[in-house]
Amino acid sequence: MTRGAELRANWRLVVAGALGFGFGLSGLPFYTFGVFVEPLSHAFGWKIAAIQAGLTVSYLTTMLLLPTIGGLVDRLGPRRVALTSVCLFSLAFMLLAVQTGSLWQFYLTWFLIALSGTGTLAVTWSRVTNGAFKSARGLALGLALLGSGVMGVVGPPVAAALVAALGWRAAYAILGLSPLLIAFPVIHAFLRPVHTAGTATVAQAEGLTLAQALRTPQLWIIGVSFLFIAGGVAGLIPNLIKIQTSAGGSRATATFAASLVGVFVILGRVSCGALMDRVWAPVVAAIYLCLPAGACLLLTQSGLGPGGSALAAACIGLAAGAEMDLLPYLVSRYFGLGRFGAILGFASAFFYLGASAGGLSLGAVYDITGSYRPALMTCAVLFLISVGGLLALGPYPNLPRLAEEPAPVDL
């Protein structure tokens, strides 16, 4: 089946994935988090690093849960996992509206957000697209994961407007309700079994088991590379405004640049996905992941003007868009789809371990030294190390058929 025919046959799956991912754990909390840092600090006197630790709790919880969630997606199918997770995640996110000033309560809330929302992550939506697409797998994956980029564009201004008009508590409550009102009905209607001849059924029986994948160097290279990638990207985005204002840049310029990140996340996600259908994925990774290394060096400059600020945001956004395409695509090509959820869950644990350290580390470096420069230089080096690791993966292997019974195909 041609790329166009696959997209026409399965566009509903792509739409469901885009909304589920955008209004899920990877989109809504991450891209609106920075809006609430100052209101929370003003309300409760919390330090920046202490507030950033809420995301760290979320990332660490996600890291521990992902292998289990990936296995559930393989066994139960993405539909049941996604619908359950969206409902519980929506309720958990609304708990941020009832904070009392206790950091332990704040961290417990972020633990519950991650506990309930891990089923809304890429492990669910990429299982859907990788099973239903073959010729257009990269493009479909990019489109299905596009929702977080859209959230990056609309989330911060909407959240800021809600905070300004109604206060941070009401803003948290309204944002928390949005997955249940917007994403859930579409996922319920669109995420249903499809029958695409020659793709999902055949692909499900090919690949490695998790035990077999663990014995390959490729899985560990992918895991460590994405630990560094996620640490850099997750550290830069929530701190982007503060990085620039602390170096003498204007807040208006920094805020505008931060709003551009979401636009370039969208461009990076779609362009990277489409490019991987035609070019060896590690080369695509090298192109996109050298960009944020340059952005880190640019951000070390004092008083960055509008042009430089926008360029740095563009480079970071393109990498942030590409990273979520690259990880599931690489897993599908090097290990197959037979136990895709479990293997991607294991690899994604490295990703969220890095993400958990990123924002907290940059915030802590600033609290201790009064400068982001040492952290920015470290991030630049880690991005380049990751590029080298992914280029060492070697060609895509010819995957065997699973010796054990393949996972169910139905959504």
Image (cartoon, rainbow, N blue to C red):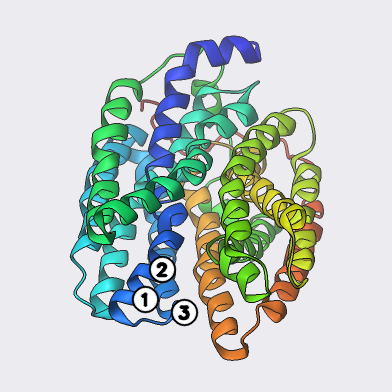
Q: Which residue is drawn at 63% across and 22% down?
A: 136
Residue 338 in picture, x, y percent from top left: 51, 37
Q: How crowded is mark 2: few (under 14 residues within 10 Å), some or many (20 or more)?
A: some
* Secondary-structure class at tag 2: helix
Residue 186 in picture, x, y percent from top left: 31, 26
Q: Gap in Å between the C-alphas at discs 3 and 1?
A: 10 Å
Question: Earlier along the polypeptide chain: callout 3 or callout 2?
Answer: 2
Q: Which residue is drawn at 48% across and 18% down?
A: 11
Check residue 37 in the rendering and tell me which mark sits there, or answer none.
Answer: 2
Residue 211 in picture, x, y percent from top left: 53, 55
* Secondary-structure class at tag 3: helix
Which residue is tagged 3? 49
Q: In this view, does 369 lie above or below 256?
A: below
Q: In this view, does 128 lie to the left or right of 107?
A: right
Q: Residues within 10 Å of mark 3 (few under 14, many from 20)?
A: some
Q: Which residue is drawn at 57% across and 70% down?
A: 242
Judging depth in this view, the residue of 106 and 137 nearest the camera is: 106
Q: Residues within 10 Å of mark 1 (few under 14, many from 20)?
A: some
Residue 220 visible somewhere in the drawing: yes
Q: Quadrant of residue 219?
A: bottom right
State which quarter of the image contains the N terminus.
top right
Callouts 3 and 1 close, C-beta under 8 Å:
no
Q: Is residue 370 above or below residue 247?
A: below
Judging depth in this view, the residue of 242 and 192 nearest the camera is: 242
Residue kind at label 2, given as amino acid type: Val
Q: Gap in Å between the C-alphas at discs 3 and 2?
A: 10 Å
